[in-house]
């Protein structure tokens, strides 16, 4: 367990790494995180695939579903884009609700898992390899853009990603996303009581960085924004914030996912879900 690790670090690195807090730009973040998710994808799907459900939509480790949240609104007949779609479970659920959902992800291996589940389930999510900061779609293409723990906390140029989201949304379109709750940044990545003791500043936005010990290259990056940063960013990009959901840990839910657990979840929120409309 690493004191510097934010909660969203859902796996232990596959090779020896040095953990640092330092500035990392968009190019370096993407160069690190794409291959990292490629390496991790098989283990991620093996560990969490059943919980996610092949055509299931959970917003985070609490198991709070879109069927309960309803934060996307009625998706029937809507054009929907999932950013950081992984194996496409959420988009597949949207398709079962009558939405035309499409996926985009930085990791080729995650998209191969998406294709595997497409074939097994018969619910196909057309998906593309790409990044949240450069969406390969025309202006005004979608009614809804969403991301469930997808790209947003892995992106350095978050203003570019949110602006590109606004560009591909039609006027009045819906944007909803979940991220590690920003207050979790203060705590060590530990699902036990030790993870309830604040040890870092909430206001320190310096990225969490893993550096490959053998090559000296950055191998994984996460970026942090405060709740206030998100509100300002959304408002400044033409969105009207309508929802900020902080799902409580369900009473009989005993699943541990990285730093998320009932021990901590009963005291502090682990997931923040934002919902906003484009003006
Ligand atoms: C925690 S997974 C979430 C995936 C899916 N929503 C789920 O619940 O399993 C994060 C996903 O974001 C993708 N990702 C990371 N950085 C990205 C970026 N810059 N653009 C698009 N996707 C990205 C990763 O490849 C990974 O599939």
Image (spheres, rainbow, N blue to C red):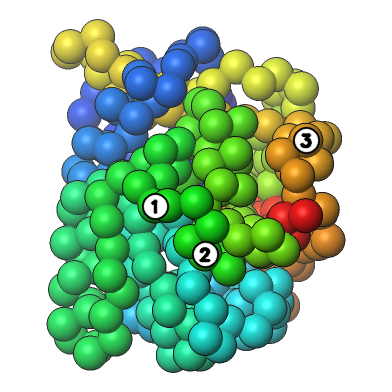
x and y percentages locating residue 122 in the rendered image = 23, 90
**Mark 1 and mark 2 residues within 8 Å of each other at the beta carbon:** yes
Screen quadrant of the C terminus: bottom right
Numbered circle sitting on residue 203 = none
Give me the residue at 41% from left, 45% from top. Answer: 135
The Cα–Cα distance between marks 2 and 3, rounded to whole angstroms, is 20 Å
Q: How many marks?
A: 3
Q: Is mark 1 within 8 Å of ligand 1?
A: no
Task: Reply above or below: 16 against 226.
Answer: above
| Residue tagged 1 | 137
Task: Reply above or below: 262 against 10.
Answer: below
Residue 163 is at least partly visible in this image: yes
Q: Secondary structure at mark 3?
A: helix
The Cα–Cα distance between marks 1 and 2, rounded to whole angstroms, is 9 Å
Numbered circle sitting on residue 142 = 2
Q: Residues within 10 Å of mark 2 (few under 14, many from 20)?
A: many
Decide which of tag 2 and tag 3 comes sooner along the chain: 2
Decide which of tag 3 and tag 1 comes sooner along the chain: 1
Numbered circle sitting on residue 236 = 3
Q: Nearer the viewer, residue 159 or 256?
A: 159
Q: Nearer the viewer, residue 195 or 39?
A: 39
x and y percentages locating residue 163 in the rendered image = 60, 39
**Mark 3 and mark 1 residues within 8 Å of each other at the beta carbon:** no
Decide which of tag 1 and tag 2 comes sooner along the chain: 1
Give me the residue at 42% from left, 74% from top. Answer: 101
Residue 189 is at least partly visible in this image: no
Nearer the observer, disc 3 or disc 1? 1
The Cα–Cα distance between marks 3 and 1, rounded to whole angstroms, is 22 Å
Q: Quadrant of residue 189?
A: top right
């Amino acid at each position: 367990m690493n004191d510097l690790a934010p909660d969203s670090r859902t796996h232990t690195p596959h090779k020896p790494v040095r953990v640092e807090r330092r500035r990392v730009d968009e190019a370096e973040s993407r160069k690190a995180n794409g291959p990292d998710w490629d390496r991790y994808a098989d283990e991620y799907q093996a560990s969490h695939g059943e919980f996610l459900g092949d055509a299931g939509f959970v917003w985070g480790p609490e198991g709070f579903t879109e069927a309960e949240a309803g934060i996307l609104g009625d998706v029937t007949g809507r054009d929907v884009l999932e950013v950081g779609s992984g194996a496409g479970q959420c988009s597949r659920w949207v398709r079962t609700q009558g939405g035309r959902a499409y996926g985009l992800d930085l990791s080729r291996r995650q998209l191969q898992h998406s294709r595997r589940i497409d074939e097994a389930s018969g619910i196909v999510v057309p998906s593309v390899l790409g990044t949240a900061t450069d969406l390969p779609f025309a202006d005004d293409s979608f009614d809804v853009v969403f991301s469930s723990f997808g790209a947003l906390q892995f992106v350095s140029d978050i203003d570019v990603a949110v602006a590109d989201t606004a560009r591909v949304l039609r006027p009045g379109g819906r944007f909803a996303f979940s991220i590690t709750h920003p207050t979790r940044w203060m705590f060590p990545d530990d699902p036990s009581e030790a993870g309830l003791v604040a040890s870092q500043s909430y206001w320190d936005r310096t990225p969490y960085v893993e550096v490959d010990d053998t090559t000296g290259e950055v191998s994984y990056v996460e970026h942090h924004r405060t709740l206030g940063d998100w509100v300002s960013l959304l408002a400044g990009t033409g969105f009207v914030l309508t929802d900020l959901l902080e799902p409580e840990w369900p009473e009989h839910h005993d699943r541990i996912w990285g730093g998320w657990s009932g021990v901590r979840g009963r005291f502090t929120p682990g997931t923040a879900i934002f919902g906003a409309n484009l003006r």
